Image (cartoon, grey):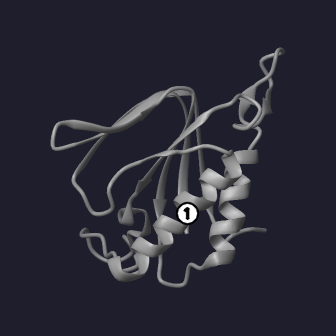
Amino acid sequence: MIAVIQRVSESSVKIEGKIKAQIGLGLMILVGIEESDGPEDIEWLSKKIVNLRIFPDENEVMNRSLLEVNGEILLISQFTLHASTKKGNRPSYIKAAKPDIAIPIYEKMIVALETELGKSIGTGVFGADMKVSLINDGPVTIVMDTKNKV
């Protein structure tokens, strides 16, 4: 599972011109799921995300977690994070999980993040044509891959 985590002052997702979800201070997360992802990936990633110390403290040092700043999450599924560009100019998405595998994992990730955060999160719609807006705060952008935990 790959996650691109962006610290934001605000973010939203629109589907067919209508806002599906929006957040204020928090994290906008793009998540790519592959077929080998499972419960241990969900658990590890959700705990890491809510506890990342990437929000400023009173000295402007990145020392506070999402939990400590009472931040929000907007989670967007994005299979293109698994693009392979090794051969040719057209990306291959062979590593990305098919919807029948990816959707249940995405739904479990939503539940895990809500449990870790202690509140509901915003989401897109799996497979929808989404328009995501954000104001990257910092900017702070972190890429995490559950296959590279060490």
State whether residue 146 appears in this view.
Answer: no
- The image shows residue 82 at horizontal and vertical percentages of 43, 69
Q: Which of the 4 image quarters holds residue 146? A: bottom right
- The image shows residue 54 at horizontal and vertical percentages of 72, 35
Figure check: 123 above or below 21: below
| Number of marks present in the image shown | 1
Location of the N terminus by quadrant is bottom right
Decide which of 93, 50 is in the foreground and name it: 50
Pick out the residue farthest to the top. 58
Q: In the image, what residue occupies the spot 74% across and 44% down?
A: 52
Q: Which of the 4 image quarters holds residue 104? A: bottom left
Q: Give the left or right position of residue 17, taking residue 115 as reference.
A: left
Location of the C terminus by quadrant is bottom right
Q: Give the left or right position of residue 30, taking residue 64 as reference.
A: left
- The image shows residue 120 at horizontal and vertical percentages of 55, 45
- Are there few (<14), some (14-19), or many (20+) residues within 10 Å of tag 1? many
Pick out the residue farthest to the left. 16
- The image shows residue 12 at horizontal and vertical percentages of 37, 34
Q: Which of the 4 image quarters holds residue 15? A: top left
Q: In the image, what residue occupies the spot 71% across and 65% down?
A: 44
Decide which of 115, 67 is in the foreground and name it: 115
What amino acid type is highlighted by mark number 1? Met
State whether residue 101 appears in this view.
Answer: yes
Label 1 residue SS: helix
Decide which of 71, 52 is in the foreground and name it: 71
Label 1 belongs to which residue? Answer: 109
